[in-house]
Amino acid sequence: MRTSLAVFTRDLRVLDNPALAAAASSPAAVPAFVIDDDIIRRFSAHANRLAFLTESLADLDESLRLRGGSLVIRRGRWPAAVLALARDAGATAIHVADDYSGYAQRRLADLAARAAADRIEVVRHPGITLAEPGNPAPAGGRAYQVFGPYYRRWQQLPVRPMAVTPDRIRLPAGLDPGRLPALAELTTACPAPARAHGGERMANARLRAFEAGGLAGYAADRDLLAAGHVSGLSPYFHLGCLSPRAVAAQLAGRPGSEEFLRQLAWRDFFHQMLAAWPGAAQRDFRSRGDQWRDDRDALQAWQAGLTGYPVVDAAMRQLAAEGYMPGRARMIVASFLTKDLYLDWRSGAAHFMRGLTDGDVACNQLNWQWVAGTGTDTNPNRIFNPIRQSERFDADGEYLRKYLPELAALPADRIHDPPAASRRACGYPAPIVEHRTATAEYRTAMSGHRARRAR
């Protein structure tokens, strides 16, 4: 009996899953997830993402069991473990979602090379993004480097048909399903107490709540920092508990959907950039010759939410408590680290990846570079004034009071930049830098870099 293997990676769902649909069309199908020991070693401290992963796998297993199958679990070096499972199952084809980081591309290529020796076909499928990297592509270039032109082409693309959700999964007889790991087997770190929980059913519940209560006001309100104005869907897109294609189809034409879908286009934009330039995950996409400061105390104050700038500190404490912060807050704290403190964006990106439940290499690293001025922003010296940002996007101080309880009693006209006496009374620190002075020094440094490049 012909058997196919469906290997889940960042597509942990049954709805609109092209790799699963293709495998399930065979007389027997093996839905599987391989715990990649190389990834676990690299990210063992990333407790929020690992906890979200284990929950998503358990939810996926239950969905497959309702269809007569189960999620087969293996662990080891990913290409070797996938191929060993394919051999055990007698599979003639391995179906897997395509992925776009340098690491993902290398391990897919390694799997294909190993499988070819056994005459096992490896078929890559779409599904992680709405538009696949390389489509659209600029004339004569590898990928778009500016979002505006990319977005205009992105809007005109035909969409792929939705994949059929299998009604029945037929496992081959006698195959050991393995065992879902407990979180403690993957990390000794503790996840954030109020983090998002994983799984396709949780994702769809969150999507329904956003569609009913947040979508219509999304365009006007998404930059507001207080709770209730963002979708909260990014962790579910990251591990594929939601299909971008299915969500776009569900929301298209609804009030507020255009701006939300534009955010999915940004996600696709960064994935197509990473696919074309995988080194941008760790290197400046556009180097300015920065000579970043080395100030461990300043970095630790930023990480701990003790900079003396309430909006920066509130956002960093939200990250610690929830494994999340809204997009506007991410831009504010990234600008503060790279412009006010003039610390290397890679330090900030690494801290985000450790803490964010939705930590995604393409979106995290390239958004950090956008803010730092080494990426795709057409205004590389853009600076976010943390006090003005706080006043504009949290006017009454609701966000600040939630995450900085020591400032909860301050009125709105003092909470964004508390006077020295209020800081002392509340036990809240003085600013570690003065914004105008620090950003003036930053601009001087940028002028020096430009002058050196011009010589």
Image: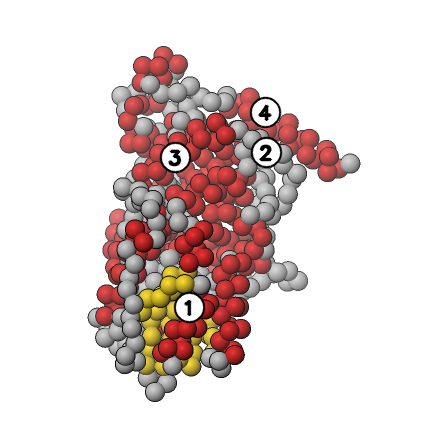
Tally of numbered discs: 4
Q: Which mark is residue 29?
A: none
Point out the image quarter for the C terminus: top right
Residue found at the far left of this picture: 66
Report the residue at 39% width, 31% height from top. 304
Residue wearing tag 1: 81
Residue wearing tag 4: 440
> In which quadrant of the rendered view does residue 17 lie?
bottom left
Q: Check disc 3 and give the amino acid type.
A: Met
Instruction: Give the mark toward the camera: 3 or 1.
Output: 1
Q: Measured along the vertical axis of the image, is residue 308 above or below residue 270?
A: above
Proximity of marks 2 and 3: CB atoms separated by less than 8 Å: no
Q: Measured from the top left, where is residue 216 in percent x and y?
A: 32, 49
Separation of disc 3 and disc 1 at Cα? 38 Å
Q: Measured from the top left, where is residue 292 in percent x and y?
A: 59, 34
Separation of disc 1 and disc 2 at Cα? 42 Å
Q: Sequence-wise, which precedes: disc 2 or disc 4?
A: 2
Q: Sequence-wise, which precedes: disc 4 or disc 3?
A: 3
Report the residue at 31% width, 38% height from top. 321
In the depicted view, which residue is nearer to us: 261 or 2? 2
Point out the image quarter for the N terminus: bottom left
Proximity of marks 4 and 3: CB atoms separated by less than 8 Å: no
Residue wearing tag 2: 292
Residue wearing tag 3: 316
Instruction: Give the mark toward the camera: 1 or 2.
Output: 1
Question: Is residue 247 among what the camera can see?
Answer: no
Report the residue at 49% width, 76% height from top. 115
Q: Sequence-wise, which precedes: disc 1 or disc 2?
A: 1
Separation of disc 2 and disc 4 at Cα? 15 Å
